[in-house]
Image (tube, helix red, strand yellow):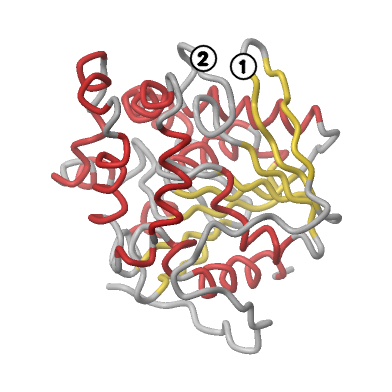
Amino acid sequence: MFRFLLGLFGMLVISLPAAAQVQSLPPGFQTQDIKVGDVTLHVRVGGQGSPVVLIHGFGDTGDMWGPLATELSRDHRIVIPDLRGMGLSSHPVDGYDKRTQAADIRAILTALDIDHATIVGHDIGTMVAYAYAARYPDKTEKLVVMDAPVPGIPPWDEIVRSPALWHFDFGGPDAERLVAGRERIYLDRFWNEFAADPSKINEATREHYTKFYALPGAMRSAFAQFRSIRQDVEDNKVSMMTKLTMPVLAIGGEKSFGATEAIVMRNAATDVTEVVVPHSGHWLMEEQPEATIAAVRTFLDRK
């Protein structure tokens, strides 16, 4: 059932470590905190050209995009936010449904005087990226989604039955007490179980992200990202009634969502390109950065 998009040969070879460290952004990137209502969003911006927004997921922050930003910033203006409640963004009480977070992204782009952009997401970022494209289709040039379901979009009912996704409903004050001071143990479960090769998420990477999820309020916000999925399901059932018409790239890890990523998006969009990244689990940028970057670059370069 899996099929691989061929034609990535002849791409510029990007030299990256086999077990990726958290790679810094290239020179010229600047950080700023953008106020959106009662939320302050931490944003990195750099490069010149047509805009591309990179949206991280759970277990990461915007720092995950260093290798891809380094490549794309040669000819694109790159915008990398930390989602509300994650990384160095503030921790509001609510607003973790993906439709609201799509509005966060729109507000960031407006503050940066950016009208149209390509939107790229991984994990929770995929859910936000879809919500953005559905809410602002006239502002979305292209959409890239990476290795995550989209709540409510078939075959959602089958996907969500997986025992591995028990964390979608995990949270609340008692769960926060259980995880407090044990954030690394909780995060290790995701890095170990959802990777094809857990060693690719090395010790330096794990330590880097754990410090953000150990900040006050961070795990409450992280749990809220998942516990809002029930609302996302209802929102997306309405959104999918109008299929997306912009080009969509659906990337799945061979040992994770694989071709299912494209199956999901074909139920929500009319122009879907499928890529399955060999030898990768969920953590595409950490496990197989070269192949993932090549797939994104090929898609963005396509006229």
Residue 170 screen position, x and y as percent: 23, 27
- Determine the secondary structure under disc 2: loop
Q: Which quadrant, please, contains the C terminus?
A: bottom right
Residue 260 screen position, x and y as percent: 33, 59
Residue picked out by circle 2: 92
Instruction: Between residue 190 and residue 21, name the one nearer to us.
Output: 21
Label 2 crowd (10 A; few <14 / some 14-19 / many >=20):
some
Q: Which quadrant, please, contains the N terminus?
A: bottom left
Q: Is residue 214 left or right of residue 105?
A: left
Instruction: Between residue 100 and residue 29, name the one nearer to us.
Output: 29
Residue picked out by circle 1: 39
- The amino acid sitting under disc 1 is Val
For residue 107, the mark is none
Instruction: Between residue 269 and residue 277, name the one nearer to us.
Output: 277
Residue 141, relative to residue 281: is it above or below? above
Q: Is residue 261 left or right of residue 208?
A: left
Question: Alpha-carbon distance for marks 1 and 2?
Answer: 6 Å
- The amino acid sitting under disc 2 is Pro
Task: Please say if the residues under marks 1 and 2 sit with CB atoms less than 8 Å apart.
Answer: yes
